[in-house]
Image: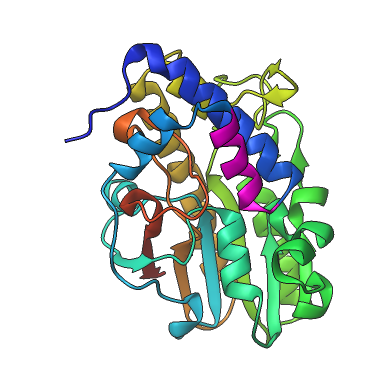
Amino acid sequence: MTMAPARRDLDVLGKLHRKSRKLETLTDDDSALNKYLKLFNIGVPMRAALLSVESIDKEPESIFSYDWQNLIILDGCRYDTYVDVVGEAEPRISKGSMSKDFVRKNFSDGDFSDIVYITANPYFYHEKFKSLTGRDVEDTFHDVFHTYIDGWNDDENTVLPEAVLADVKEAQRRYPEKRKIVHFMQPHHPFIGFELAEHGFGDITEDDVFVNEWDLAMRGELDHETVQDAYRSNLERVMPYAEKVADAVDGTTMLTADHGNLLGENGLYWHPPRSKAKALRKVPMTEL
């Protein structure tokens, strides 16, 4: 049985997490990350911890295999946390373990010209979307509301659910007959109302890499209960707005997540790409 990283390894894990996030920002070529791990030989504790997390062997399910007129996506929502906080839901196995996997594997092929996408997630930014899918985001969907640009909240350093709901209402006014995908940022960090990392998506810089809540938790500077409570609070914060979305649009509305999140499994707190960890791939799928 593989043990969780020792306390002395937490700084190494946190450093690796920050370096890997910087590389993910600079390139979508995962070989660059693998090269980094080998070159600096600091990926061993991370790899051992990640590989020993319970994995899932079921085939992933497309979001388009379900019958919906409107689909709400919660960002980084674990299945077990959703059930504990909100209530019953069917499980779905996501195609990705982080947002860029979700975008690449769901939207690289297919006709989505009947869909209006309202998103707080910045992976739908023009250059990023094209680098992941090879497609122009504006040509892929009927229309895209880039809420992460116009709805950014400087105080919380994230996109609040209110901004997403406002864009949903405008999208419904303009395109009442179109299908809609509504992508909230929560329960993904930053945690609304919690001053765990001063600048939200990034706190202080170390080696030109922002430090966020996951880094602090992996270094042992945030205890598990605090992080868990903040994560659950973000889910509680977004759910009333998910329900308001369902009320604002016509037709069947379903809710799911793009991926889950590691929340203390073997000392890990994040969502690395291309992982089959159960906590990252098992997400809720339910009708509102």
Q: Which residues are the magenta region?
A: 28-39
User: In the rendered image, which quarter contains the N terminus?
Assistant: top left
Q: Is residue 37 magenta?
A: yes
Q: Is residue 181 above or below residue 86?
A: below
**Quadrant of the rendered image containing residue 125:** bottom right
Where residue 261 appears, x then y in whole percent?
A: 43, 45
Give the total number of marks visible in the rendering: 0
Q: Is residue 193 visible?
A: no
Residue 114, percent across and down?
69, 87
Question: Which residue is painted at 35% across and 28% down in the image?
Answer: 267
Q: Is residue 162 above or below residue 19?
A: below
Q: Is residue 142 magenta?
A: no
Q: Residue at x 57, y 60 (%)?
A: 101
Return the residue nearer the eye: 169 or 209: 209
The answer to whether residue 71 is visible is: yes
Q: What secondary structure is the stretch in magenta mostly built from?
A: helix
58 on left or right of 98: left
Q: Quadrant of residue 143?
A: bottom right
In front: 42, or 95?
Answer: 42
> Is residue 161 rendered to the left or right of residue 91?
right
Residue 121 as seen in the image, left or right of residue 244: right
Vertical placement of 62 versus 50: above or below? below
- Tell me which corner region of the image, top left, top right, bottom left or bottom right, holds residue 47: top left
Q: Where is residue 188 drawn, in percent x and y?
A: 53, 43
Instruction: State the image coordinates of residue 110 (x, y, percent, origin top left).
Output: 64, 86
Location of the C terminus (image quadrant): bottom left
Is residue 2 depicted above or below 73 in this figure? Answer: above
